[in-house]
Image: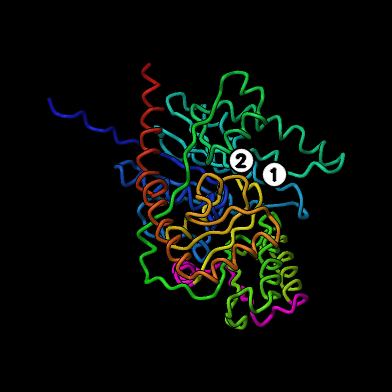
Amino acid sequence: MGKTATPKLKIAIIHPDLGIGGAERLIVDAAVQLTSHGHNVHVFTAHHDKNRCFEETLFGTFLVTVYGAFLPRHIFYGFHALCAYMRCIFVALCMLLLWPTFDVILADQVSVIIPLLKIKKKTKIVFYCHFPDLLLAQHTTMLRRLYRGPIDKIEEITTGMADLILVNSRFTSSTFANTFRRLNAQGIQPSVLYPAVNVEQFDEPCAYKLNFLSINRFERKKNIDLAISAFAMLRACEADVLAGHNLAEVSLTLAGGFDKRLKENVEYIEELKILVEREGLSDHVTFVTSCSTAERNTLLSQCIGVLYTPKDEHFGIVPLEAMAAQKPVIACNSGGPMETIRHEVTGFLCDPTPQEFCQAMVKLINEPQLAEKMGKEARKHVSEAFSTKIFGQRLNQLVLDVTHRRQE
């Protein structure tokens, strides 16, 4: 007998804002990979700026439909969660009313839409939880606690209604269990689906110039000032510490997503520029905002190493991109990077202090052959464990498994 044909499914993906970021990268990779496995994929979102998005969303490989772009992202720079709920609910309603039934709906980030999606009895709902939102929100005042209380309860209840819950790392899985204790008591446990990177896109000729690169959205939680402080400490080193290297040759590039619509982006980049000036580094630090994929790849191909500064990051796609580009990563020894970076093999896992980051930077400068050796190991590591092909195979199997449950 011949092999049973793999079923081809109609799959919808709902994502709040299809811009540029780690969550968006994952959704785009999911759409591309599911399409490559023969499924019909349609992405629904409340915002998609064709001038600020991943190129794959423009190729027509999968459909992208926008509903609710007119709805606000915030109200007087507050109520972001409430606005996100409104936007996603609107997207979900439009999808349910205007499009035929899907076999699977992958809801990303916002769980409040899951009860709506369950109206379609035969449709399986997969929810991707990058991190419990209640842990990302501020609960600093009584007013905030009153505002967030119902939202936090709704998040746990609606998350538990999904047919399958996915998280981006073992770290997030552990946090999920400790945060959503009621779900954990009910035996509801998420499956880990690591984000991935397209290794083949980093095939440019590789150089190891004396430039350190930071890639992150310009948000305070990304702790980019750590990179500046470590670089300032590096430039303060005595000449003998740097094995005779001319400090004038060493530079730092701060690249990342920047959205002028977001108040924090605008404020934080100004704070960083002030810090650079105060440290006397203006001639040695370059800011690159919202660079294209090609520009990012060029930056990666020419640096000596990548500084990844967020503490307790849920996963972190940048270390994978850096390692795929054959560059060692200096990152904080917490969260997702603990699962992706092999300490002193593909990079360094450090305490989040300028001193430790600086020490690792000195090692790479003094031993160029070490950076190259680590880079080769890093490329091999990512190819074997975190390629988009492996991600696609895992996601495809998870989707097929959850649809099979309907017949059990």
Q: Which residue is situated farthest in the top direction here? A: 408
| Pointers 1 and 2 in contact (C-beta within 8 Å) | yes
Residue 310 is left or right of residue 407, and the answer is right
Dot placed on the residue nearer the N-terminal end, 1 or 2: 2
* Residue 290 among those drawn in magenta: yes
Q: Which residues are magenta?
A: 277-302
Residue type beneath disc 1: Leu
Residue 136 is left or right of residue 382, and the answer is right
* Residue 29 among those drawn in magenta: no
Measured as percent of width and height from the top left, residue 253 is found at: 59, 72
According to the picture, the residue beneath numbered tag 1 turns out to be: 136
Residue shown at 37% from the left, 72% from the top? 205
Q: Few, some or many C-alpha atoms within 10 Å of disc 2 (few <14, some 14-19, many ≥20)?
A: many
Residue shown at 42% from the left, 25% from the top? 122
Identify whether 261 is placed above or below 11: below
* Mark 1 secondary-structure assignment: helix
According to the picture, the residue beneath numbered tag 2 turns out to be: 131
